[in-house]
Amino acid sequence: MKKKNYLFMLLCLAGLLKATSGNAQGLPNNKFGEICSENIKWVAFPAFPPEARLAILVGDPKKAGPYVVRVQVPAGVILKPHIHPENRIYTVISGVFYIGIGTKFDATKLKAYAPGSVVILPGNTPHFHWARSGTYVTQVTANSPLGISYIDPADDPRNKSKK
């Protein structure tokens, strides 16, 4: 099982490399820098549903070290149950962020977080999201490498593109 998880993590990182090569804008975290909101570069991320977008703000999520990314999910989009190996801090930037804990999608387990809310998600916690009431943007602060593994491999958009 560990070998399978390791292989899946390598595939996830390869997808991240592909999604961010040439598009990454992450500022180094050891010197002054800035990205104004109108200059944020949103890119598709193979591990997300095709409508969702990712923006790298600080650091390099595929290399060891701290990073900050933003995730934009349009109205109605669901991210099925998944885990991240890294501990994460979510800050809701806009919209309402609905997140539920568990290995099965269950709308009754969703909790709504308004802009300005902060959510701590320990690594390897199974969870799911739903842009239930409209588009939301969250900012994720964590230590790399970024990883995502779906509980049910059939829910992983990267597997759908292989069919």
Image: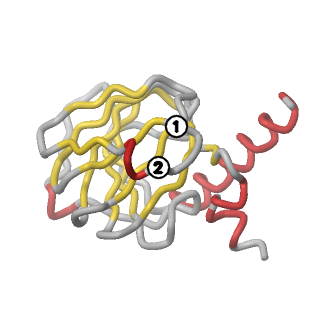
Which image quadrant: the C terminus?
bottom right
Which residue is found at the position 35% from the left and 53% from the top?
71
Taking 131 as reference, is 91 above or below it?
Answer: above
| Badge 2 vs badge 1, beta-carbon distance below 8 Å | yes
- Image mark count: 2
Task: Kindly identify the amino acid type of the residue bearing the numbered disc 2.
Answer: Asp
Q: Quadrant of residue 76?
A: bottom left
Q: Quadrant of residue 99?
A: top left
What residue is shown with label 1?
102
Task: Kindly identify the amino acid type of the residue bearing the numbered disc 1.
Answer: Gly
Measured from the top left, where is residue 113 in percent x and y? 20, 42
Which residue is found at the position 16% from the left and 53% from the top?
94
Front in this rendered view, residue 42 or 162: 162
Q: Is residue 9 left or right of residue 104?
A: right
- Given the current orientation, which residue lies at the most extreme bottom position? 163
Q: CA distance from mark 2 to mark 1?
A: 8 Å
Measured from the top left, where is residue 131 in percent x and y? 32, 60
Q: Quadrant of residue 132?
A: bottom left
Measured from the top left, where is residue 23 in percent x and y? 44, 62
Taking 33 as reference, is 31 above or below it?
Answer: above
**Label 2 element class:** loop
Front in this rendered view, residue 60 or 102: 102
**Label 1 element class:** loop
What residue is shown with label 2?
106
Which image quadrant: the N terminus?
top right
Which residue is found at the position 62% from the left and 65% from the top?
157
